[in-house]
Amino acid sequence: MARDSSATKARLLDAAFSEFAAYGIAGARVDRIAEAAQANKRLIYVYFGNKEQLFDGVLQRALETGSESVPFDVEDLPGYAGAIFDHLVAQPSLMRLMLWKQLERPGSADAEAASYRAKIARVEQAQREGLIEPSLDPADVLTLVMGLSQAWFGAMGGPAAGAGCAGGADWEPERLARHRAAVVESVRRATTPAP
């Protein structure tokens, strides 16, 4: 029976995502990843190289999935912020992964930097077209939108902590809706050009 390497890689990436989100790069264990993926530990090294390269693969996959799930909409930054919020509600462990990335690997990879530069250029163009408040630096606009969309998830005891973590809790739909509305309204107020 032939092995399905793409299915094995996908299982390894899924298991590694959970492991890295829970423990970070330093705390993650290849043995646990292999066991959770029901794969031979050696395959991690064959397919991905070392643990750090596996983390890179997990992060790249998460960023690609996020970009597909939440396309950047410079003409509706409040809606974009709300969509990011929704994406994180659906997968709060993604924020934990990003927090570990910031802690253990500050800075951005080439793909991340290129993505941000492209978004900043689109913000700048939208400012010239009068769609976004022109007095703000385009990079600051993007930082504001991303920061407001993600801030609640990184808060102590917030949703990214999860019900099983100290201080973490599951949040009621009404509370989620209020926070989402506050994020969207804050982005709208900050980015709408003054009359």
Image (tube, rainbow, N blue to C red):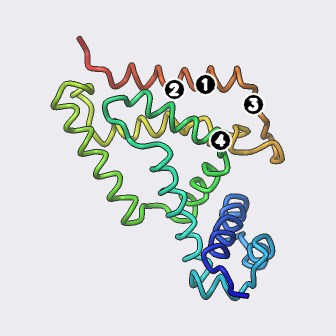
Instruction: Assess whether mark 1 and mark 2 are in contact (beta carbons under 8 angstroms).
Output: yes
Q: Residues within 10 Å of mark 4 (few under 14, many from 20)?
A: few
The first of marks 1 and 4 along the sequence is 4
The first of marks 4 and 3 along the sequence is 4
Q: CA distance from mark 2 to mark 3?
A: 16 Å
Q: Residues within 10 Å of mark 2 (few under 14, many from 20)?
A: many
Q: CA distance from mark 1 to mark 3?
A: 11 Å
Q: CA distance from mark 2 to mark 4?
A: 16 Å
The first of marks 1 and 3 along the sequence is 3
Query: What label does residue 94 carry, if any?
Result: none
Residue kind at label 3, given as amino acid type? Trp
Task: Please state if 68 lies on the left or on the right of 159 as rendered.
Answer: left
Q: Residues within 10 Å of mark 3 (few under 14, many from 20)?
A: few
Residue that protrudes farthest toward the left in the picture: 128
Residue drawn at 35 percent across, 58 percent down:
113
Residue kind at label 1, given as amino acid type? His
The first of marks 2 and 3 along the sequence is 3
Quadrant of the image containing the N terminus: bottom right
What is the x, y in percent for residue 163? Answer: 81, 42
Query: What label does residue 171 carry, if any?
Result: 3
Residue 49's place in the image compared with 65, above or below, is below
What is the x, y in percent for residue 11? Answer: 69, 69
Query: What label does residue 179 carry, if any?
Result: 1
Q: Residues within 10 Å of mark 1 (few under 14, many from 20)?
A: some
Relative depth, front residue between 112 and 43: 43
What is the x, y in percent for residue 181? Answer: 55, 21
Quadrant of the image containing the C terminus: top left
Q: Which residue is mark 2?
A: 183
Q: Which residue is mark 4?
A: 90
Report helix, strand or loop for mark 1: helix
Residue that protrudes farthest toward the top in the picture: 195
